Amino acid sequence: MQSQLEPEQERMLVEGARRDPEAFRQLYNHYFPKVYAYVSYRMGRVGDAEDLVAETFLKMVEGLDGFAWRGAGSCAAWLFRIAHNLVNDFYRRGQRTEEAIPLDELPELRASTLLPEDVILQKEKFAYLRRLIGSLSPRRQEVITLKFFGGLPNKEIAALLELDERTVASHLCRGLEELHRRYVNEVAKEGSSR
Amino acid sequence: MSERNELPQRDRKLLEKIEEIVANGDGERRETDSLYGFCAHLASTVPQADQSFQQQLEARLLTEMQQQREVRTLGVTSQDQGAARPPLAWLRRLAPGGVTSAPLSTGLSLSKGVGRNITQIFQGGVTMKKGFAFATLAALVIVVSVVAFVPAVRAGVSGWFRASWGGPDAGCSAAIRAEGSQPGFTVLVPSYLPDTVLSSATGSVTIAMGGDADEMRNFFGNPDGQWLFITQGQAPADKALPEGQQVAIGGQRGVLITSLSGTSELGLADLENVAVEGTPPEHRPESFAYQNANQLIWYVGDTRIELLSNLPVEEMLKVAESFRPAEVTEGEPPADWVPEQSEGGSSGGGVLPLPTSGK
């Protein structure tokens, strides 16, 4: 996961990006992996994720002139709010029902190995964990995906979801505990059925 | 940090570990029977984009920025030279002296380059009061587009949709101009809107335009009071409906989903690139949060409609039953649609005068 931008660095890039392609490129390349990872986890299918990521950044370009930088992380919060709204709208419109996604439609994962069998295993793991996360309450799903895949600090998640930071921390802890419990139970059940 | 200190020590320790794991992405090999090990396991499944996609999108965005700069400085993009007239060009032509207070950029329509361009114009009735901001925003239409990386094939047809919101006496009417081609669905408007929505929908008049007419959204009312959010677009082939309580709307099968909470995107930021008639809203949130709202989803012919609202379900059903196709005429703007010279502008867009009559 890439590190956070220093506040001053983010401010300069945001302001520069309005007229300087190089500044925009830096901003884009900093946020792209995080937005892509977050949207991919929420969407599942590569095709859907790419559509929404593209739309997120197009909206960013369109709104950059009107965006006012308001301190550390405000750009990330703005960008993720766009992505978050697009994802929610997608599901609200019922464009896709939850169903098993074929492995070849799942995204690639960051991995140190390129062995084909490992790639398949990674994708299966992704599909499994995504399904497990999907069994949590929507709020906990959101907090966990923003944290682990969007890489956002709790403060930015709180601003984005209009919660206080303590509530975010609590959702994160309880959500992960619940997730882990389900994981252990499922693994145990699978083991005993063999 | 102080908030973190109020948490139990166990949570604080977990949060610290999470920060460490997310920052370092380590621990793929850690045992998943411990909570920390499981967190590391989770952090090792971060999706990664195809590099060519990332690069193509970057190139697309840089082109987009370039076009926006051209629009700001020249009022036209290089792609438009010698091509079809951009949306809103007729507004500049018709308004004596032009609308100079703020750029009437073509916004999304230039940026997307796919599908249809629509200019939507809302006009207020004579009983409308003036001087309110977002809380009294009369009607908002946003057109959202689907992103694609192929050039548009335009049908070269212009069309006008005349719509009257809430009946002919409600004083809330609209003319929608489609440039390039007709939308891929029949535009529908409700002939009934509850007074509680319309009463706060007086005054300010918005002219909004967007890019490609794959979807149209209208927001009525006051986000702090009663409101109604309509989304319509082309029906998919299977006309699938999500899970929910089954209802009949005009003899069609629909679905009611209750007690929804969340946020919905209004796209008010797009007003940066649109003309605003009347008093432009001061606040332009990109989205509004709602709680305990209800949603109706159904199909009318080739159109998929969603109503999201905090109105009682009975009222929503009444609105839903009242949807009718908008009147469509083609060619030049309606004869009574002659903007006069505006006075001043706003930061968000050009201010245009009210038409003499909308009906």
Image: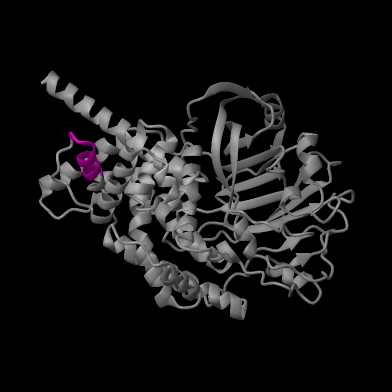
Residue depicted at x 48% and y 26%? B243
User: Residue B63 location, x and y as percent?
Assistant: 45, 72
Residue A118 visible at all: yes
- Answer with the quarter of the image where residue B30 lies: top left
Residue drawn at (75%, 72%) of the image: B99
A42 drawn magenta? no
x, y (%) of residue A61? 49, 65
- The residue nearer to you, when weighing B357 against B262, is B262
Q: Of A6 and B261, which appears nearest the observer?
A: A6
Q: Which residues are magenta?
A: B33-42
Give the residue at x 45% y 43%: A166
Specify whether residue B40 is painted magenta: yes
Applied colour scheme:
one colour
Q: How many marks?
A: 0
Q: Residue at x 83, y 52 (%)?
A: B358
A14 over B244 or under it: above or below: below
Would you say B8 lies left or right of B251 here?
left
The secondary structure that dominates the magenta segment is helix
Left or right of B348 on screen, residue A121: left
x then y, percent, for residue B321 = 69, 29
Is residue B47 visible to us here?
no
The vertical placement of B36 against A112, above or below, is above
Residue most extreme to the bottom: B74
B222 relative position to A143: left or right: right
Q: Please, which residue is most extreme toward the top here?
A: A193
Q: Nearer the viewer, residue B120 or B10?
A: B10
Query: Left or right: B352 with respect to B186?
Result: right
Q: x, y percentage for residue A187? A: 18, 27
Residue B248: image quadrant is: top right
